[in-house]
Amino acid sequence: MPLLKVIVLAIVQGLAELLPVSSSAHVIVAEKLMGLDPSAPEMTLLLVMLHSGTMFAVIVYFWRSWRETYFKSAVAFKRFAALVILATALTAIIGEAIVKVIERTAFAGVPNAEVEDLFGHLEIIAPALAAAGVLILIAGIFEHRRRASSAAAQELSAKQAGLIGAVQGLCLPFRGFSRSGATISVGMLAGVAKLRAESFSFVLAVVLTPPVVARELLRLMHAQRIEGTAGLAAAVFPSLLGAVFAFLAGLVALRWLSRWLERGRWYVFGIYCLIAATAVAALHHIGY
């Protein structure tokens, strides 16, 4: 794959990751426009590695806040770790269950079919973006009404953390259904303050990224058209390069996007997702 295309995809990922607009959908659409196959093993690995790059940017950017919030004492850390384990366990159980259902129903009778084969289908990404947009709009309206009545909870309960983790599991198989948009929105609807819901959502993403990267590496290694070490290295190197550029783009974006996100109105992102869904549907209609 030309390195210029990798860099373009990395910049798209880095700029879109912080916002609840599904960076995966943006990257996949960019891949389609550049004539790449988003469902190919090397392309799904690239997508995951781009997420890895921006997740490292998130760690660097939010580390001080996380340290002051989650690592201020042994008691705080134990409570935080328990919530993360609960949420991640529910993500794994629900996400894996949905993946198996999709592979055994949508791909019934198709040998070696995987859920990643759906990633190139814009007709699926478009409604997923629309669903995320509706959820964000509902959460935005709820947030506006809550500001006029009472303050949101600053601390997560086990029930709230579990709900956020469960929704994250629903997001895993569907590109376009924004993980951050869905988890933050559900947290807000469950009564969690937006800043706390956002912080916890990014923590879960950081925890989730390594096993997802490992899964895609195994998938790449077992792909029939990747043979030998040289072929594997040729596929992995662009992904590593993309992760570096996504990290740099993510740091640049985080410097100003985070402030804009918190000062802006949440429902605006819902409107954007609905517009993006329409654009993706139009691209599918004309043959992409």
Image (cartoon, rainbow, N blue to C red):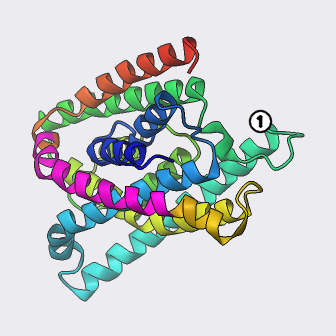
Q: Residue furthest bottom?
A: 74
* Quadrant hosting residue 68: bottom left
Give the main secondary structure of the magenta stretch: helix
Along the line of sight, which residue is nearer the eye, 213 or 199? 213
Residue at image position (68%, 53%) is 97
* Quadrant hosting residue 277: top left
| Extent of the magenta region | 237-260
Number of numbered labels in the structure image: 1
| Residue 162 seen anywhere in this rendered image of the structure | no
Residue 207 appears at what percent x and percent y?
42, 68
| Relative horizontal placement of residue 123, taking residue 195 as reference (left or right) | right
Residue at image position (27%, 52%) is 198
| Relative horizontal placement of residue 280, taking residue 226 as reference (left or right) | left
Along the line of sight, which residue is nearer the eye, 130 or 31? 31
Quadrant in the picture for the C terminus:
top right
Up-down relation of residue 186 to residue 266 (above or below): below
| Relative horizontal placement of residue 196, taking residue 97 as reference (left or right) | left
Residue 120 appears at what percent x and percent y?
59, 34
| Disc 1: which residue | 106
| Residue 268 seen anywhere in this rendered image of the structure | yes
Q: Helix, strand or loop at disc 1?
A: loop
Residue 242 appears at what percent x and percent y?
39, 55
- The amino acid at mark 1 is Ala
